[in-house]
Image: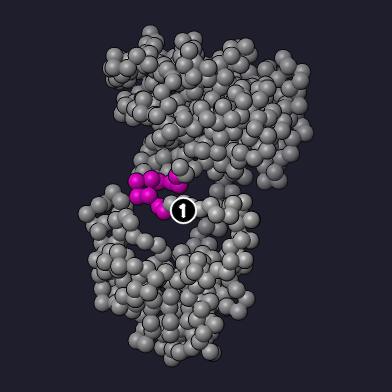
């Protein structure tokens, strides 16, 4: 009996099925079976699945005699599954590396819950990866496992089948199966979560959810979107059959109205001439399942009321008016931004005509984030050693609290920001300033860098386009030409910086100012820090602080 049964329905995904199955077979965790269900796909999905099954005994294939749809295809996989836990993976999606090991470890530490909810990221054809916007709902704080009533915010996470692991005995005991039709996830996920005796969460991206350029099957224009009504009938029938779940009726009623509204206002889903009929069906469902009591955001109250009243024409008129208003508002906002940007650039050009302020220095770090790194160390030292020096720190408003009170703060994109860049004699940064900065005669720019170069950087990336991405090398060289001094921590860094950032600046191989604190800290402060971190006296503490990896699109923690 394997730990996992991974069920993969396949229909018209021949271009993606290899990547999907490889993402499972290449996992370091090997205790699983894969059940590919060929939903009578007219392309090569069936033969691809058979090839994998011939090569690996863990892969089984079910060929359906006719196309049944996602729900019945998953049921066919369920009937064959023997793993402790059921995992679903659509044929055009993939598991992330180490996903199965991560899931297995979390199941172990949370005591084998009925359901484990894990995270996903939307992956676009361009390669861009965007994590689920409600990832905060998967924070692993509080009890290891819980009931849905303890964390109802979990319902904000996308209600799909493939971002969860299900204990097979729980699924079989409850008799859960998928219905036919569109939106088959709805009468599965809601009943599963409502009835689960124990739920756990995993705050890790385990699934890459492919966003096809032309959308998925739910983006097609068809009357099958009317299946949503039958799916919610099934949800409420499940609740009605279990009196202990009655508390969830108002929540499901609100989510049903939200779902209807999303469908009604989504372009390209409902065929022309069917919106009035859809609205009438929605009104009938509101009357049949009406369960007030759940909190409704103010912005949604009118929308829900119009559905309950069946005010189809009013809803459409308000919807159209809202779209027009939104368009006008966006155009006005864009115009205001353009005027403001032009005014700021005019202000900057005027400031460039005024004399430099020889006793002023402006500092920034990490693209205008907080008071940190070598620029912060230099700013503090310069303020202490140079009489009459006035220092300015550029940072975002949310980071202003990190800047010492004796240092002036300016925010990016303001008139004060452009004045500081135009008039200050000294400019210090560990990255580059705004590309529109004009380096004036008499200004001195110090580049402190922010670490030791142990990876491919700068102009060396010209021959590595996959790592370089959209880097503008012409702009990079123009930025480098503004440097007067390049601060280097050691000879290795000096050799790399001078090769990869070629220009006529002067290298100052004086060390890394941000590390001076390690040499100046007094013994009593070290003892206090050891006690705070619970590091025993005499033992060595190793700080692991990984940098960005060119081959990863997101953070990775070993």
Image quarter where the C terminus lies is top left
Judged left or right of residue 139, residue 53 is: left
- In the rendered image, residue 362, in percent from the top left (x then y), is placed at 48, 78
| Magenta stretch bounds | 547-556
- In the rendered image, residue 393, in percent from the top left (x then y), is placed at 52, 74
Q: For residue 320: magenta?
A: no
Q: Is residue 316 above or below residue 348?
A: above
- In the rendered image, residue 423, in percent from the top left (x then y), is placed at 45, 85
Q: For residue 554: magenta?
A: yes
Name the image quarter holding residue 435: bottom left
**Front residue of this view, candidates 446 and 534:** 534
Residue at the spot x=71%, y=33% of the render?
Answer: 150
| Residue 364 visible, this angle | no
Residue at the spot x=59%, y=43% of the render?
Answer: 136
**Front residue of this view, candidates 338 and 157:** 157
Residue at the spot x=36%, y=40% of the render?
Answer: 125
Mark 1, residue position: 545
Judged left or right of residue 492, residue 276 is: right
Judged left or right of residue 331, residue 150 is: right
- For the stretch drawn in magenta, the main secondary structure is loop
């Amino acid at each position: 009996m394997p730990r996992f049964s991974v069920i993969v329905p396949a229909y018209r995904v021949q271009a993606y099925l290899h990547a999907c199955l490889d993402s499972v077979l290449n996992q370091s965790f090997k205790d699983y079976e894969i059940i590919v269900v060929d939903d009578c796909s007219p392309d090569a999905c069936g033969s691809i699945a058979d090839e994998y099954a011939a090569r690996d005994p863990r892969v089984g294939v079910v060929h359906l005699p006719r196309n049944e749809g996602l729900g019945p295809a998953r049921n066919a996989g369920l009937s064959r599954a023997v793993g402790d836990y059921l995992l679903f993976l659509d044929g055009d999606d993939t598991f992330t590396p180490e996903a199965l090991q991560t899931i297995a470890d979390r199941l172990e530490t949370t005591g084998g819950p009925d359901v484990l909810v894990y995270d996903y990221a939307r992956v676009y054809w361009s390669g861009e990866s965007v994590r689920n916007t409600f990832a905060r709902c998967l924070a692993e704080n509080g009890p290891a496992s819980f009931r849905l009533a303890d964390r109802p915010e979990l319902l904000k996470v996308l209600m799909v089948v493939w971002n969860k692991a299900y204990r097979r005995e729980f699924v079989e005991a409850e008799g859960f199966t998928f219905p036919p039709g569109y939106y088959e996830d709805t009468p599965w996920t809601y009943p599963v979560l409502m009835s689960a005796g124990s739920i756990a969460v995993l705050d890790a991206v385990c699934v890459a959810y492919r966003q096809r350029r032309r959308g998925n099957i739910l983006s097609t224009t068809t009357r099958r979107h009317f299946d949503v009504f039958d799916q919610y009938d099934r949800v409420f029938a499940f609740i009605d059959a279990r009196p202990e779940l009655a508390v969830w009726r108002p929540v499901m009623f609100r989510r049903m109205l939200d779902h209807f509204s999303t469908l009604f206002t989504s372009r390209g889903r409902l065929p022309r001439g069917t919106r009035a009929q859809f609205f009438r069906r929605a009104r009938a469902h509101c009357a049949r399942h009406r369960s007030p009591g759940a909190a409704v955001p103010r912005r949604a109250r009118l929308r829900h009321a119009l559905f309950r009243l069946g005010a189809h024409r009013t809803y459409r008129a308000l919807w159209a008016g809202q779209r027009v208003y939104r368009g006008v508002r966006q155009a006005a906002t864009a115009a205001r931004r353009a005027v403001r940007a032009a005014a700021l650039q005019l202000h900057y050009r005027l400031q460039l005509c005024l004399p430099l302020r020889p006793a002023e220095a402006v500092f920034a770090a990490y693209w205008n984030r907080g008071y940190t790194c070598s620029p912060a160390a230099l700013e503090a030292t310069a303020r202490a050693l140079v009489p009459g020096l006035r220092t300015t720190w550029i940072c975002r408003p949310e980071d202003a609290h990190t800047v010492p009170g004796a240092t002036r703060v300016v925010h990016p994109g303001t008139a004060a920001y452009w004045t500081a860049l135009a008039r200050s004699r000294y400019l210090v940064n560990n990255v580059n300033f705004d590309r529109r900065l004009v380096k004036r005669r008499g200004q001195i720019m110090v580049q402190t860098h922010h670490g030791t170069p142990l990876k491919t950087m700068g102009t060396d990336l010209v021959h590595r386009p996959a790592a370089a991405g959209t880097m503008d090398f012409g702009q990079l060289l123009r930025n480098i030409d503004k440097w007067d001094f390049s601060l280097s921590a050691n000879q290795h860094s000096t050799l790399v910086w001078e090769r990869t950032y070629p220009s006529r600046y002067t290298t100052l191989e004086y060390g890394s100012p941000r590390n001076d604190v390690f040499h100046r800290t007094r013994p009593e402060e070290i003892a206090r820090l050891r006690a705070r971190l619970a590091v025993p006296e005499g033992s060595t503490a190793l700080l692991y602080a990984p940098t960005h990896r060119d081959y990863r699109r997101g953070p990775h923690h070993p």
